[in-house]
Image (cartoon, rainbow, N blue to C red):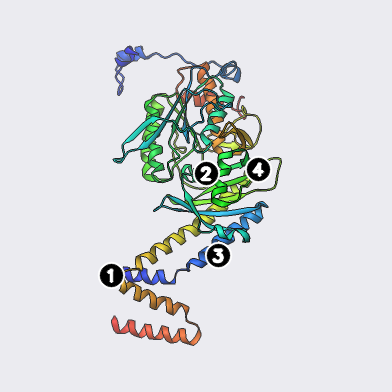
Protein backbone atom coordinates (compact mmCIF):
# COMPACT_ATOMS: atom_id res chain seq x y z
CA UNK A 1 0.00 0.00 0.00
CA UNK A 2 3.05 2.30 0.22
CA UNK A 3 2.71 3.41 -3.38
CA UNK A 4 -0.86 4.47 -2.71
CA UNK A 5 0.37 6.86 -0.05
CA UNK A 6 2.29 8.77 -2.73
CA UNK A 7 -0.97 9.63 -4.42
CA UNK A 8 -2.43 12.90 -3.14
CA UNK A 9 -5.82 12.20 -1.60
CA UNK A 10 -7.46 15.51 -2.46
CA UNK A 11 -6.46 16.13 -6.08
CA UNK A 12 -4.96 14.27 -8.98
CA UNK A 13 -1.97 15.82 -10.79
CA UNK A 14 -1.57 14.80 -14.44
CA UNK A 15 1.54 12.67 -13.79
CA UNK A 16 -0.21 10.79 -10.97
CA UNK A 17 -3.15 9.73 -13.13
CA UNK A 18 -1.14 6.98 -14.77
CA UNK A 19 -0.19 5.57 -11.39
CA UNK A 20 -3.75 4.93 -10.23
CA UNK A 21 -4.70 2.54 -12.99
CA UNK A 22 -7.12 0.11 -11.34
CA UNK A 23 -8.08 -3.39 -12.39
CA UNK A 24 -11.81 -3.96 -12.77
CA UNK A 25 -12.52 -6.64 -10.17
CA UNK A 26 -15.87 -7.56 -11.73
CA UNK A 27 -16.24 -9.90 -14.72
CA UNK A 28 -18.41 -9.09 -17.71
CA UNK A 29 -21.25 -11.07 -16.23
CA UNK A 30 -21.65 -11.08 -12.49
CA UNK A 31 -23.74 -14.06 -11.45
CA UNK A 32 -24.07 -16.24 -8.36
CA UNK A 33 -21.59 -18.78 -9.74
CA UNK A 34 -18.91 -16.09 -9.91
CA UNK A 35 -19.97 -14.24 -6.78
CA UNK A 36 -20.50 -16.90 -4.13
CA UNK A 37 -20.25 -20.46 -5.45
CA UNK A 38 -17.85 -22.51 -3.34
CA UNK A 39 -17.39 -19.73 -0.79
CA UNK A 40 -17.67 -20.47 2.93
CA UNK A 41 -16.94 -16.94 4.06
CA UNK A 42 -13.47 -18.07 5.21
CA UNK A 43 -11.19 -15.15 5.96
CA UNK A 44 -14.03 -12.68 6.44
CA UNK A 45 -14.41 -11.00 9.84
CA UNK A 46 -18.04 -10.40 10.75
CA UNK A 47 -18.95 -8.35 13.81
CA UNK A 48 -22.30 -8.87 15.55
CA UNK A 49 -23.12 -5.56 17.26
CA UNK A 50 -25.93 -6.70 19.55
CA UNK A 51 -26.76 -8.31 22.90
CA UNK A 52 -23.70 -10.61 22.95
CA UNK A 53 -23.25 -14.12 21.59
CA UNK A 54 -23.56 -17.28 23.69
CA UNK A 55 -20.27 -19.14 23.66
CA UNK A 56 -20.29 -22.70 22.39
CA UNK A 57 -23.84 -22.61 21.05
CA UNK A 58 -24.20 -25.60 18.68
CA UNK A 59 -25.69 -23.41 15.93
CA UNK A 60 -22.92 -20.83 16.25
CA UNK A 61 -19.81 -22.81 17.18
CA UNK A 62 -16.58 -21.16 18.19
CA UNK A 63 -16.52 -17.39 17.99
CA UNK A 64 -13.31 -15.48 17.46
CA UNK A 65 -13.91 -12.62 19.86
CA UNK A 66 -16.37 -11.22 22.40
CA UNK A 67 -16.22 -7.72 23.81
CA UNK A 68 -18.68 -5.76 25.93
CA UNK A 69 -18.74 -2.03 25.30
CA UNK A 70 -20.03 0.22 28.09
CA UNK A 71 -19.70 3.89 28.99
CA UNK A 72 -17.63 5.03 31.95
CA UNK A 73 -18.64 7.80 34.39
CA UNK A 74 -17.20 10.50 32.10
CA UNK A 75 -18.91 8.98 29.07
CA UNK A 76 -15.69 7.32 27.95
CA UNK A 77 -15.83 4.06 26.02
CA UNK A 78 -14.89 0.95 27.96
CA UNK A 79 -14.32 -2.19 25.88
CA UNK A 80 -13.54 -5.32 27.85
CA UNK A 81 -13.74 -9.02 27.25
CA UNK A 82 -17.34 -10.14 27.49
CA UNK A 83 -17.70 -12.92 30.03
CA UNK A 84 -21.49 -12.68 30.26
CA UNK A 85 -22.24 -14.06 26.81
CA UNK A 86 -25.70 -13.16 25.56
CA UNK A 87 -28.15 -11.44 27.90
CA UNK A 88 -31.17 -11.78 25.65
CA UNK A 89 -30.71 -14.36 22.90
CA UNK A 90 -30.91 -11.95 20.01
CA UNK A 91 -27.19 -11.59 19.30
CA UNK A 92 -26.79 -15.37 19.36
CA UNK A 93 -29.66 -15.62 16.87
CA UNK A 94 -27.94 -13.19 14.49
CA UNK A 95 -24.58 -15.00 14.81
CA UNK A 96 -26.31 -18.31 14.07
CA UNK A 97 -27.93 -16.92 10.91
CA UNK A 98 -24.56 -15.64 9.61
CA UNK A 99 -22.91 -19.01 10.38
CA UNK A 100 -25.71 -20.96 8.68
CA UNK A 101 -24.86 -19.16 5.43
CA UNK A 102 -21.13 -18.48 5.80
CA UNK A 103 -19.94 -21.33 8.08
CA UNK A 104 -16.26 -20.39 8.06
CA UNK A 105 -16.60 -16.64 8.54
CA UNK A 106 -15.07 -15.29 11.74
CA UNK A 107 -17.67 -14.10 14.25
CA UNK A 108 -16.78 -11.29 16.64
CA UNK A 109 -19.37 -10.25 19.19
CA UNK A 110 -19.49 -6.63 20.33
CA UNK A 111 -22.13 -6.34 23.02
CA UNK A 112 -23.81 -2.94 23.32
CA UNK A 113 -27.09 -4.03 24.92
CA UNK A 114 -28.05 -5.53 28.22
CA UNK A 115 -27.11 -3.00 30.86
CA UNK A 116 -30.55 -1.34 30.84
CA UNK A 117 -32.19 1.10 28.54
CA UNK A 118 -30.62 4.34 29.76
CA UNK A 119 -27.72 5.36 27.60
CA UNK A 120 -28.33 2.56 25.13
CA UNK A 121 -28.18 5.00 22.19
CA UNK A 122 -24.78 6.34 23.23
CA UNK A 123 -23.49 2.85 23.97
CA UNK A 124 -24.58 1.78 20.50
CA UNK A 125 -22.59 4.70 19.05
CA UNK A 126 -19.51 3.88 21.16
CA UNK A 127 -19.75 0.19 20.24
CA UNK A 128 -20.03 0.98 16.55
CA UNK A 129 -17.04 3.34 16.72
CA UNK A 130 -15.03 0.63 18.48
CA UNK A 131 -16.08 -1.98 15.91
CA UNK A 132 -15.07 0.29 13.02
CA UNK A 133 -11.66 0.81 14.65
CA UNK A 134 -11.18 -2.97 14.59
CA UNK A 135 -11.60 -2.86 10.80
CA UNK A 136 -14.04 -5.75 10.61
CA UNK A 137 -15.10 -6.57 7.06
CA UNK A 138 -18.79 -6.58 7.98
CA UNK A 139 -20.65 -5.12 10.96
CA UNK A 140 -24.14 -6.58 11.40
CA UNK A 141 -26.49 -4.11 13.12
CA UNK A 142 -29.94 -5.49 13.83
CA UNK A 143 -30.75 -2.40 15.87
CA UNK A 144 -31.13 1.34 15.54
CA UNK A 145 -31.56 4.54 17.47
CA UNK A 146 -34.19 7.26 17.13
CA UNK A 147 -32.07 10.05 18.61
CA UNK A 148 -31.48 12.73 15.97
CA UNK A 149 -28.42 14.12 17.72
CA UNK A 150 -26.84 10.65 17.47
CA UNK A 151 -27.98 10.42 13.86
CA UNK A 152 -25.38 12.96 12.75
CA UNK A 153 -22.57 11.17 14.54
CA UNK A 154 -23.73 7.81 13.20
CA UNK A 155 -23.72 9.32 9.73
CA UNK A 156 -20.06 10.28 10.07
CA UNK A 157 -19.18 6.86 11.47
CA UNK A 158 -21.03 5.12 8.64
CA UNK A 159 -19.09 7.17 6.10
CA UNK A 160 -15.73 6.41 7.67
CA UNK A 161 -16.62 2.72 7.74
CA UNK A 162 -17.54 2.91 4.07
CA UNK A 163 -14.23 4.53 3.10
CA UNK A 164 -12.12 2.05 5.09
CA UNK A 165 -13.97 -0.92 3.54
CA UNK A 166 -16.03 -1.96 6.53
CA UNK A 167 -19.55 -2.81 5.41
CA UNK A 168 -22.36 -1.80 7.75
CA UNK A 169 -25.38 -4.00 7.19
CA UNK A 170 -28.33 -2.69 9.20
CA UNK A 171 -31.98 -3.58 9.85
CA UNK A 172 -34.54 -1.28 8.33
CA UNK A 173 -37.32 -0.19 10.62
CA UNK A 174 -40.67 -1.67 9.72
CA UNK A 175 -42.56 1.09 11.44
CA UNK A 176 -43.08 4.66 10.23
CA UNK A 177 -40.39 6.18 12.46
CA UNK A 178 -37.11 7.95 11.77
CA UNK A 179 -34.25 5.84 13.03
CA UNK A 180 -30.57 5.41 12.23
CA UNK A 181 -28.19 4.25 10.82
CA UNK A 182 -30.07 2.09 8.31
CA UNK A 183 -31.31 5.09 6.28
CA UNK A 184 -27.84 6.22 5.24
CA UNK A 185 -26.70 5.38 1.72
CA UNK A 186 -23.27 4.29 2.99
CA UNK A 187 -25.07 1.50 4.87
CA UNK A 188 -26.76 -1.59 3.38
CA UNK A 189 -30.30 -1.67 4.78
CA UNK A 190 -32.35 -4.84 5.00
CA UNK A 191 -36.06 -5.63 5.33
CA UNK A 192 -37.84 -9.02 5.29
CA UNK A 193 -39.47 -11.19 2.65
CA UNK A 194 -41.71 -14.15 3.46
CA UNK A 195 -39.96 -16.96 1.61
CA UNK A 196 -38.09 -19.90 3.17
CA UNK A 197 -34.85 -19.96 1.19
CA UNK A 198 -32.04 -18.18 3.07
CA UNK A 199 -30.23 -17.41 -0.20
CA UNK A 200 -33.24 -15.75 -1.79
CA UNK A 201 -33.01 -11.98 -1.50
CA UNK A 202 -34.45 -9.07 -3.44
CA UNK A 203 -33.14 -5.65 -4.43
CA UNK A 204 -35.71 -2.98 -3.65
CA UNK A 205 -36.28 -0.51 -6.50
CA UNK A 206 -37.72 1.93 -3.93
CA UNK A 207 -35.12 2.71 -1.26
CA UNK A 208 -34.29 3.65 1.51
CA UNK A 209 -34.72 -0.08 2.27
CA UNK A 210 -32.29 -1.55 -0.26
CA UNK A 211 -32.67 -5.32 0.10
CA UNK A 212 -35.20 -7.84 1.39
CA UNK A 213 -33.83 -11.06 2.87
CA UNK A 214 -35.39 -13.99 4.71
CA UNK A 215 -36.88 -12.69 7.94
CA UNK A 216 -40.13 -14.55 8.54
CA UNK A 217 -40.46 -17.77 10.55
CA UNK A 218 -36.72 -18.31 10.77
CA UNK A 219 -35.41 -21.01 13.13
CA UNK A 220 -32.72 -19.18 15.03
CA UNK A 221 -30.27 -19.99 17.80
CA UNK A 222 -31.36 -18.77 21.24
CA UNK A 223 -30.12 -19.02 24.81
CA UNK A 224 -28.95 -22.17 26.59
CA UNK A 225 -28.06 -23.94 23.36
CA UNK A 226 -31.67 -23.79 22.24
CA UNK A 227 -33.47 -22.36 19.25
CA UNK A 228 -36.75 -20.58 18.54
CA UNK A 229 -38.76 -19.56 15.51
CA UNK A 230 -38.56 -15.83 15.01
CA UNK A 231 -39.71 -13.08 12.67
CA UNK A 232 -38.31 -9.61 12.15
CA UNK A 233 -35.97 -7.54 10.05
CA UNK A 234 -33.34 -8.21 12.67
CA UNK A 235 -33.10 -11.79 11.36
CA UNK A 236 -33.16 -10.77 7.69
CA UNK A 237 -30.13 -8.56 8.30
CA UNK A 238 -27.68 -11.35 9.27
CA UNK A 239 -28.92 -13.38 6.28
CA UNK A 240 -27.66 -10.62 4.00
CA UNK A 241 -24.50 -10.25 6.12
CA UNK A 242 -23.87 -13.96 5.54
CA UNK A 243 -24.32 -13.58 1.79
CA UNK A 244 -22.01 -10.53 1.76
CA UNK A 245 -19.47 -12.63 3.70
CA UNK A 246 -19.65 -15.28 0.96
CA UNK A 247 -18.94 -12.59 -1.65
CA UNK A 248 -16.02 -11.14 0.32
CA UNK A 249 -14.67 -14.61 1.13
CA UNK A 250 -14.38 -15.36 -2.55
CA UNK A 251 -13.43 -11.85 -3.65
CA UNK A 252 -11.50 -10.18 -0.83
CA UNK A 253 -10.69 -6.53 -1.30
CA UNK A 254 -13.98 -5.51 -2.89
CA UNK A 255 -15.16 -2.15 -1.56
CA UNK A 256 -18.58 -1.85 0.12
CA UNK A 257 -19.79 -0.08 -3.03
CA UNK A 258 -18.64 -3.00 -5.20
CA UNK A 259 -20.15 -5.59 -2.82
CA UNK A 260 -23.44 -3.70 -2.88
CA UNK A 261 -23.33 -3.72 -6.68
CA UNK A 262 -22.60 -7.47 -6.70
CA UNK A 263 -25.47 -8.05 -4.27
CA UNK A 264 -27.74 -6.08 -6.57
CA UNK A 265 -26.63 -8.06 -9.63
CA UNK A 266 -27.12 -11.47 -7.99
CA UNK A 267 -30.33 -10.63 -6.14
CA UNK A 268 -33.25 -12.91 -6.99
CA UNK A 269 -35.24 -10.26 -8.86
CA UNK A 270 -32.24 -9.07 -10.94
CA UNK A 271 -29.79 -11.73 -12.10
CA UNK A 272 -29.81 -14.31 -9.32
CA UNK B 1 -45.97 34.10 34.53
CA UNK B 2 -48.85 34.17 32.03
CA UNK B 3 -47.36 31.12 30.30
CA UNK B 4 -47.11 29.26 33.55
CA UNK B 5 -50.71 29.97 34.47
CA UNK B 6 -51.93 29.11 31.00
CA UNK B 7 -50.05 25.80 31.22
CA UNK B 8 -51.64 25.20 34.59
CA UNK B 9 -55.10 25.81 33.17
CA UNK B 10 -54.32 23.45 30.29
CA UNK B 11 -53.06 20.79 32.71
CA UNK B 12 -56.21 21.03 34.77
CA UNK B 13 -58.49 20.28 31.85
CA UNK B 14 -56.35 17.43 30.46
CA UNK B 15 -57.96 14.04 30.76
CA UNK B 16 -57.40 12.36 34.09
CA UNK B 17 -55.10 9.39 34.70
CA UNK B 18 -58.10 7.02 34.53
CA UNK B 19 -59.04 8.30 31.06
CA UNK B 20 -55.60 7.38 29.76
CA UNK B 21 -55.72 4.02 31.46
CA UNK B 22 -59.02 3.37 29.68
CA UNK B 23 -57.57 4.44 26.31
CA UNK B 24 -54.52 2.19 26.71
CA UNK B 25 -56.69 -0.69 27.87
CA UNK B 26 -58.94 -0.30 24.82
CA UNK B 27 -55.85 -0.47 22.60
CA UNK B 28 -54.65 -3.75 24.12
CA UNK B 29 -58.16 -5.22 24.11
CA UNK B 30 -58.52 -4.45 20.39
CA UNK B 31 -54.98 -5.74 19.68
CA UNK B 32 -55.80 -9.00 21.43
CA UNK B 33 -59.07 -9.34 19.49
CA UNK B 34 -57.57 -8.54 16.09
CA UNK B 35 -54.72 -11.03 16.48
CA UNK B 36 -56.93 -13.62 18.18
CA UNK B 37 -54.37 -13.69 20.98
CA UNK B 38 -54.60 -14.88 24.58
CA UNK B 39 -53.18 -11.71 26.07
CA UNK B 40 -51.89 -8.24 25.25
CA UNK B 41 -50.24 -5.55 27.33
CA UNK B 42 -48.58 -2.15 27.20
CA UNK B 43 -45.42 -1.56 29.20
CA UNK B 44 -44.46 2.02 29.98
CA UNK B 45 -40.79 2.96 30.27
CA UNK B 46 -40.02 4.82 33.51
CA UNK B 47 -36.87 6.75 32.71
CA UNK B 48 -36.21 7.74 36.32
CA UNK B 49 -35.89 4.18 37.58
CA UNK B 50 -34.85 2.64 34.22
CA UNK B 51 -37.71 0.15 34.54
CA UNK B 52 -40.65 -1.09 32.49
CA UNK B 53 -44.07 -0.82 34.16
CA UNK B 54 -47.24 -2.63 33.13
CA UNK B 55 -49.57 0.25 32.12
CA UNK B 56 -52.44 -1.75 30.59
CA UNK B 57 -53.39 -5.42 30.37
CA UNK B 58 -56.20 -6.79 28.21
CA UNK B 59 -57.28 -9.70 30.38
CA UNK B 60 -59.73 -9.01 33.18
CA UNK B 61 -58.13 -11.63 35.42
CA UNK B 62 -54.64 -10.22 34.97
CA UNK B 63 -55.37 -6.66 36.05
CA UNK B 64 -53.18 -7.23 39.12
CA UNK B 65 -50.19 -6.94 36.77
CA UNK B 66 -50.88 -3.23 36.19
CA UNK B 67 -48.26 -1.26 38.09
CA UNK B 68 -45.78 -4.16 38.32
CA UNK B 69 -42.30 -3.22 37.20
CA UNK B 70 -39.06 -4.87 36.15
CA UNK B 71 -35.62 -3.65 35.00
CA UNK B 72 -35.45 -2.40 31.39
CA UNK B 73 -32.48 -4.70 30.78
CA UNK B 74 -34.64 -7.76 31.29
CA UNK B 75 -36.40 -10.03 28.85
CA UNK B 76 -37.64 -9.58 25.33
CA UNK B 77 -39.48 -6.32 26.07
CA UNK B 78 -36.26 -4.77 27.36
CA UNK B 79 -34.41 -5.78 24.22
CA UNK B 80 -37.17 -4.46 21.96
CA UNK B 81 -37.09 -1.14 23.80
CA UNK B 82 -33.29 -0.82 23.59
CA UNK B 83 -32.93 -2.01 20.01
CA UNK B 84 -36.11 -0.14 18.94
CA UNK B 85 -36.96 -3.09 16.77
CA UNK B 86 -40.12 -5.22 16.68
CA UNK B 87 -39.73 -8.96 17.28
CA UNK B 88 -41.94 -11.96 16.84
CA UNK B 89 -40.93 -15.13 18.66
CA UNK B 90 -42.58 -18.55 18.73
CA UNK B 91 -41.97 -21.35 21.23
CA UNK B 92 -40.32 -19.02 23.68
CA UNK B 93 -40.77 -21.65 26.37
CA UNK B 94 -37.86 -23.53 24.86
CA UNK B 95 -35.71 -20.74 26.24
CA UNK B 96 -35.49 -21.52 29.95
CA UNK B 97 -33.99 -18.20 31.00
CA UNK B 98 -36.68 -16.27 29.20
CA UNK B 99 -39.43 -18.37 30.79
CA UNK B 100 -38.01 -17.85 34.23
CA UNK B 101 -37.67 -14.08 33.87
CA UNK B 102 -41.15 -13.66 32.51
CA UNK B 103 -42.72 -16.06 34.98
CA UNK B 104 -41.13 -14.16 37.82
CA UNK B 105 -42.43 -10.82 36.63
CA UNK B 106 -45.83 -11.78 35.27
CA UNK B 107 -46.76 -15.18 36.61
CA UNK B 108 -47.64 -16.15 33.06
CA UNK B 109 -45.36 -17.86 30.56
CA UNK B 110 -46.39 -17.34 26.95
CA UNK B 111 -45.58 -19.71 24.11
CA UNK B 112 -45.39 -17.08 21.39
CA UNK B 113 -44.89 -13.36 21.61
CA UNK B 114 -45.00 -10.26 19.41
CA UNK B 115 -43.34 -7.18 20.88
CA UNK B 116 -43.05 -3.77 19.31
CA UNK B 117 -41.41 -0.61 20.64
CA UNK B 118 -43.64 2.42 21.25
CA UNK B 119 -41.83 5.37 19.72
CA UNK B 120 -42.97 8.98 19.71
CA UNK B 121 -40.69 11.40 17.91
CA UNK B 122 -37.26 10.58 19.27
CA UNK B 123 -38.49 9.08 22.48
CA UNK B 124 -39.06 5.39 23.14
CA UNK B 125 -42.01 5.34 25.52
CA UNK B 126 -42.60 1.66 26.10
CA UNK B 127 -43.45 -1.67 24.51
CA UNK B 128 -46.68 -3.21 23.19
CA UNK B 129 -46.88 -7.00 23.56
CA UNK B 130 -49.29 -9.51 22.06
CA UNK B 131 -48.99 -12.98 23.56
CA UNK B 132 -50.01 -16.40 22.28
CA UNK B 133 -51.65 -15.98 18.95
CA UNK B 134 -53.24 -19.17 17.60
CA UNK B 135 -50.89 -21.59 15.82
CA UNK B 136 -50.51 -20.67 12.17
CA UNK B 137 -48.47 -22.14 9.41
CA UNK B 138 -46.91 -18.92 8.20
CA UNK B 139 -46.57 -15.55 9.72
CA UNK B 140 -47.51 -12.71 7.45
CA UNK B 141 -45.59 -9.48 7.24
CA UNK B 142 -48.93 -7.69 7.00
CA UNK B 143 -49.54 -8.77 10.60
CA UNK B 144 -46.30 -7.13 11.64
CA UNK B 145 -47.37 -3.93 9.94
CA UNK B 146 -50.72 -4.06 11.67
CA UNK B 147 -48.91 -4.40 14.97
CA UNK B 148 -46.87 -1.33 14.00
CA UNK B 149 -50.08 0.64 13.46
CA UNK B 150 -51.33 -0.29 16.90
CA UNK B 151 -47.97 0.69 18.30
CA UNK B 152 -48.26 4.15 16.77
CA UNK B 153 -51.67 4.57 18.39
CA UNK B 154 -50.49 3.33 21.76
CA UNK B 155 -47.40 5.57 21.55
CA UNK B 156 -49.57 8.63 20.93
CA UNK B 157 -51.67 7.77 23.98
CA UNK B 158 -48.56 7.21 26.10
CA UNK B 159 -47.06 10.51 24.95
CA UNK B 160 -50.22 12.33 26.10
CA UNK B 161 -50.16 10.50 29.40
CA UNK B 162 -46.54 11.51 30.04
CA UNK B 163 -47.28 15.11 29.12
CA UNK B 164 -50.24 15.24 31.50
CA UNK B 165 -48.17 13.70 34.30
CA UNK B 166 -45.40 16.20 33.77
CA UNK B 167 -47.84 19.11 33.74
CA UNK B 168 -49.42 17.94 37.00
CA UNK B 169 -46.02 17.43 38.60
CA UNK B 170 -45.10 21.01 37.62
CA UNK B 171 -48.24 22.32 39.34
CA UNK B 172 -47.26 20.85 42.67
CA UNK B 173 -45.38 23.33 44.78
CA UNK B 174 -46.65 26.27 42.70
CA UNK B 175 -49.65 27.66 44.66
CA UNK B 176 -50.64 30.36 42.14
CA UNK B 177 -50.59 27.98 39.19
CA UNK B 178 -52.40 25.40 41.27
CA UNK B 179 -55.13 27.96 42.11
CA UNK B 180 -55.60 28.83 38.43
CA UNK B 181 -55.68 25.14 37.57
CA UNK B 182 -58.20 24.40 40.30
CA UNK B 183 -60.54 27.12 39.00
CA UNK B 184 -60.16 25.89 35.40
CA UNK B 185 -60.69 22.28 36.43
CA UNK B 186 -63.76 23.15 38.52
CA UNK B 187 -65.28 25.15 35.64
CA UNK B 188 -64.66 22.26 33.27
CA UNK B 189 -66.63 19.93 35.52
CA UNK B 190 -69.64 22.22 36.00
CA UNK B 191 -72.78 21.57 33.97
CA UNK B 192 -75.74 23.50 32.54
CA UNK B 193 -76.71 26.76 34.23
CA UNK B 194 -73.94 26.54 36.82
CA UNK B 195 -71.35 26.32 34.09
CA UNK B 196 -72.82 29.34 32.29
CA UNK B 197 -72.86 31.30 35.54
CA UNK B 198 -69.24 30.33 36.25
CA UNK B 199 -68.21 31.32 32.74
CA UNK B 200 -69.98 34.71 33.09
CA UNK B 201 -68.19 35.31 36.39
CA UNK B 202 -64.78 34.53 34.86
CA UNK B 203 -65.52 36.74 31.82
CA UNK B 204 -66.40 39.61 34.16
CA UNK B 205 -63.20 39.02 36.16
CA UNK B 206 -61.16 39.00 32.95
CA UNK B 207 -62.68 42.38 31.95
CA UNK B 208 -61.80 43.88 35.36
CA UNK B 209 -58.20 42.61 35.19
CA UNK B 210 -57.53 43.61 31.59
Contact, CB < 8 Å: mark 1 with mark 3? no
Q: Residues under labels 1 and 2: Cα distance?
A: 46 Å
Q: Disc 2 vs disc 3: which is toward the camera?
A: 2
Q: Which mark is residue B140?
A: 4
Q: Disc 2 vs disc 4: which is toward the camera?
A: 2
B207 vs A270, left or right, is left
The total of numbered circles placed on residues is: 4
Q: Disc 1 vs disc 3: which is toward the camera?
A: 3
Mark found first going from the N terminus, 2 or 4:
2
Q: Residues under labels 2 and 3: Cα distance?
A: 26 Å
Viewport quadrant of the N terminus of chain A: top left
At mark 4, the secondary structure is loop
Q: Is residue A108 above or below residue B85?
A: above
Q: Residues within 10 Å of mark 4 (few under 14, many from 20)?
A: some
Residue indicated by mark 1: B1
| Image quadrant where residue B201 sits | bottom left
Q: Are marks 1 and 4 on the same chain?
A: yes
**Which residue shows up at 42% across the image and 14% down it?**
A22
Mark found first going from the N terminus, 2 or 3:
3
The chain ID associated with circle 1 is: B
**Which residue shows up at 42% across the image and 63% down it?**
B165
Amino acid sequence: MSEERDIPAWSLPREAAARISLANPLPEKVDRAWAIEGSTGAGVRVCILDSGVERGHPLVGEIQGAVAVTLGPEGETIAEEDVEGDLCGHGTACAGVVRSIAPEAEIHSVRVLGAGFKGSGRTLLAGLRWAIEQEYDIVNMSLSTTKRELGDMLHELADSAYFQRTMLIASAHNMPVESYPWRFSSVVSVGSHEEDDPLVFYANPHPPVEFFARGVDVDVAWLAGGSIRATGNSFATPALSGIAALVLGKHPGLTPFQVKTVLYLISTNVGG
Amino acid sequence: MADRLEAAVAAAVLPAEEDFAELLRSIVVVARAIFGAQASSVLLFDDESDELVFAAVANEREQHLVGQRFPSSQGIAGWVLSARTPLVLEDVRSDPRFSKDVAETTGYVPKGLMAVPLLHDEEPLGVLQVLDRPERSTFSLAEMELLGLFATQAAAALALLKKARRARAALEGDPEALAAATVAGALERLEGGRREAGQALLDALARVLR
